[in-house]
Image (cartoon, rainbow, N blue to C red):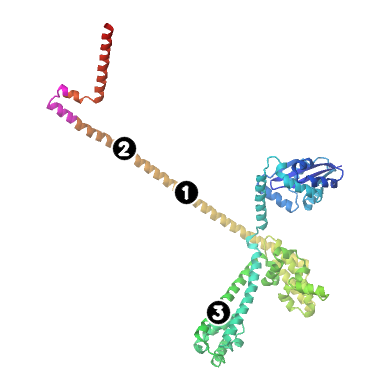
Amino acid sequence: MVLLHVLFEHAAGYALFAVREVEEIGLLLPQVEESVLTLGKFHNVVKLVAFSPFRSAQSALENMNAVSEGVLHEDLRLLLDTALPPKRKKVVLGVGDAKMGAAVLEELGVQCQTGGVVAELMRGIRLHFPALVRGLTAQSAAKAQLGLGHSYSRAKVKFNVHRVDNMIIQSISLLDQLDKDINTFSMRVREWYGYHFPELIKIVPENSMYCRVAKFIGNRRELSEESLEGLEEIVMDSAKAQAILEASRSSMGMDISPLDLINIESFSRRVISLSDYRKGLQEYLRSKMSQVAPSLSALIGEVVGARLISHAGSLTNLAKYPASTVQILGAEKALFRALKTRGNTPKYGLIFHSTFIGRAAAKNKGRISRYLANKCTIASRIDCFSEVPTSVFGDKLREQVEERLAFYETGEPPRKNLEVMKEAVVEASEVVAEVKRRQEKKEKKRKKREKRRLEALAAAAEEAAENSVMETEENDVGAKKKKKKKKQQQPEELQAEAEPEENGVEEEEEEEPLPKKKRKVLVEPEEEEEEKKKKKKKKKKAVAQDSEED
């Protein structure tokens, strides 16, 4: 009997399901296929044994990276140790990835199986997972999958900004396109301006220089000895400038109108700007190659190295290629044609543009191309997987190729590879130590600047707080003073109001006493109403007494 367990990796966590005991796992396949779409039937086949949710998004990302690389994470190891039965001889663990199965077998000693019934069980678990795990809704599972998918993809795409080979691929493609465009446009300028000054083509064969000279001369009839200095600055040769002046005086070309000259000068200006941009782009490519692949650029040059990276798709792909593939990279058509016609296969591809193959004799071109491809493969792998990029290995590999060329020509034996690599490792370690020292100094300076900035911000915040406290105190003092003034002013006003009333009363009393009738008039209306009510009550009482006596 075999006890089958299925390990399921979900964005929410790891889940371990148990399947009933069977004599052979293959017998479960018809039953699983029938029940996989119905939750009730599928419940009878599998049962949740344990569920280990991820603690955080970072933990989920770490576990998924481990699963994708076929590494057994500590969280998964803990789940399997605690959830699997102690007697593991009869236990078979179903996993989705063969790499993970190999890792579990190596570290825990549990037999693993992939495909067949396990794939169908995985399909059913994936379909009914929110219903099989209590407390997990379909909405929360979808959110977890979306978040983990985004973070996993972001981590896979994220590279070091200074070591991105995509920029090199785009730069070399644009450089090749610019070369074609500048060549085409320069030929158009030659053809167009050649009607007016055909002798200039033989004197100035270089494309961008021809465009500069054509723009400078304009109408050849206006060219004089005063323009010789300007011509010398452009062509960098006094004899050539004098030849241009003499040819302009005896030219066979046709006359040209000012409007045609304006168009030719405008087009020449565009071609000159394109050639200037090409120079800047080449410098940019050189700097990028020194950052991304310093060893490869030191070995075969920036342009050829960039073409190899572009043709392979990335530096990582180039590092994965064997030397035999790098040797014929770029000559695929010739290779397949040779295989089809059973002819001789090509000896070199893109690496033919390096200087080494051109310097070798005809009989040694294939040998040196094979040796150079071997060194290019080593250089690309060093550049791809080294933490601190350095050109030390590239320089040493270039020395080895030079020695091999000398060996082919003179028979002088080259140094052994082991000796050269030992020297390179020592020098590279020194360079790396120096780079790390500089990085530490930069980091210290950055921390000091950050500390000063924070101190300045804290001091500014304290000053602002003190100023606000002072302002509030001043406002409180001012408010208190205002209140005191108001209090002092109120009794004075009351006294001032009361004094004239008293004086008026005294004056009235002194003049003459009021008669009784007038005094009654001065009685307030409320007192009059009370007196009226009292009189009414007295009358009622009197009427009541009279009625009783009767």
Q: Secondary structure at mark 3?
A: helix
Whether residue 409 is in magenta: the answer is no
Q: Callout 3: few (<14), some (14-19), or many (20+) C-alpha neighbours within 10 Å?
A: some
Quadrant the C terminus occupies: top left
Which portion, as a residue range, is magenta?
502-517
Residue 538 versus residue 357: which sits nearer the camera? 538
Q: Amino acid at mark 3?
A: Phe
Disc 1 is placed on an element classified as: helix
Residue shown at 63% from the left, 69% from the top? 171
Task: Name, please, the residue furthest toward the bottom.
Answer: 250
Residue with the mark numbered 3:
267
The answer to whether residue 140 is above or below residue 185 is: above
Residue 461 is tagged as: 1
**Relative to 400, is 208 above or below?**
below
Q: Which residue is mark 2?
A: 484
Task: Specify the farthest residue to the left.
Answer: 511
